[in-house]
Image (spheres, rainbow, N blue to C red):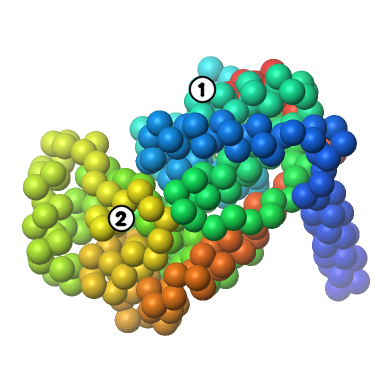
Amino acid sequence: MTKVLVFLLFILMNTMLICNSQLSPSYYDDTCPNVLSTIRTSIRQAVSRERRMAASIIRLHFHDCFVQGCDASILLSEEAVPDSERTALQNNNSARGFEVIDDAKVEVEKVCPGVVSCADILAVAARDASVAVGGPSWTIKLGRRDSTTSSRSEAEDNLPRFTNSLQELIDNFDEKNLNVRDLVALSGAHTIGQAQCVTYRGRIYDNTSDIDAGFASTRQRGCPNTVGDGDKNLAPLDLVTPNSFDNNYFKNLVQKKGLIASDQILFSGQETDSIVNEYSNDPAIFKADFANAMVKMGDISPRTGDNGIIRRVCSILA
């Protein structure tokens, strides 16, 4: 039995190595040499129209990779598949930017039809969105294929929730081969973007919370303490520089001004405190770690070769 298990583990590891080895930064050099510049232009235009979109695109990539791997399954609409990830609790009425990826795909199809996957476009778009708001850049390995399926239940099981404890978050990331440092670095994406009242109401009205009193009072003005009243009202995750990718998110956590409980839990007298302190004091280290973590995240279970398709339209199976 032991020999069988060892053999199966050997096969699994080799399969993973083969899949990852098929991804390469130069994958489209011959088949679609202008793909990166085409995506970059499209994403820059989208972020120029709405700065918040940068956060939405990065989040979309994150939510894609944590479910079935980085396979563009989150982009499939309800009309395309009955089990769309878009309707999962963590995505419904909050995941956004689908039309931006669709638009980027249209532009890519003009220069090289049927060549570039939606999964690769989303991965590149996340990098370009980061750069557009002052965040880091990173080299993206390409060659992913698109999924033909989506899974609402898997999304609800795998995506983090704003009510998670630190250990639940650590375990969640560990299942994707992302370590504690990756968890803290990727959480730093919340230095841009906004959150709905329903996700932070419990924290700002919790009398037992260690939240900064002035910060809580400010946030309460736009988030009534009544379920259903103002649930979708938005507040910036970083009140100081909400549209710039910097390390203020971590400075906020140190000052007990984290908007969402699952953010503040990263600085609550536990093992992640030292990383938060490091990032709050050194933005260069944070940006470098964020870039490295995004590369690791982009390697989660990629579909390659015959294990996927190239969708001509990202939201449907075509």
**What is the x, y in percent for residue 57?**
49, 41
Image height check: is 148 above or below 250? above
Query: For the point 15% across and 52% down, which residue is it?
Result: 219
Residue 237 left/right relative to 213: right
- Mark 2, secondary structure of its residue: loop
| Residue 167 - label | none
Rendering quarter of residue 255? bottom left
Q: Position of residue 7 (x, y in %)?
A: 90, 65
Residue at left offset 69%, top offset 55%: 139
Q: Which residue is drawn at 75% across and 45% down?
A: 142
Residue count near mark 1 (Cα–Cα under 10 Å), binned few <14, some 14–19, many ≥20: some
Q: Is residue 180 visible?
A: no
Report the side of 281 relative to 177 (left or right).
Answer: left
Q: In which quarter of the image is the N terminus?
A: bottom right
Q: Quadrant of residue 283?
A: bottom left
Which of the two residues, 286 or 212, is positioned nearer the viewer here?
A: 286
Q: Which of 204 and 175 is in front in this view?
A: 204
Q: Mark 1 points at which residue?
A: 78
User: In which quadrant will I find the C terminus?
Assistant: top right
Mark 1 in CB contact with mark 2 (< 8 angstroms): no
The reply, left or right, for residue 226 in relation to residue 289 is left
Quadrant location of residue 228? Answer: top left
The residue that appears at 58% across and 33% down in the rendered structure is: 41
Cα separation, mark 1 vs mark 2, equals 35 Å
Secondary-structure class at tag 1: loop
Q: What residue sits right under mark 2 in the picture?
A: 241
Q: Which amino acid does label 1 sit on?
A: Glu
Amino acid type for the residue under numbered disc 2: Thr
Residue 275 placement, left or right of 103: left
Give whichever of discs 1 and 2 has the lower sequence position. Answer: 1
Mark whose residue sits in front, 1 or 2:
2
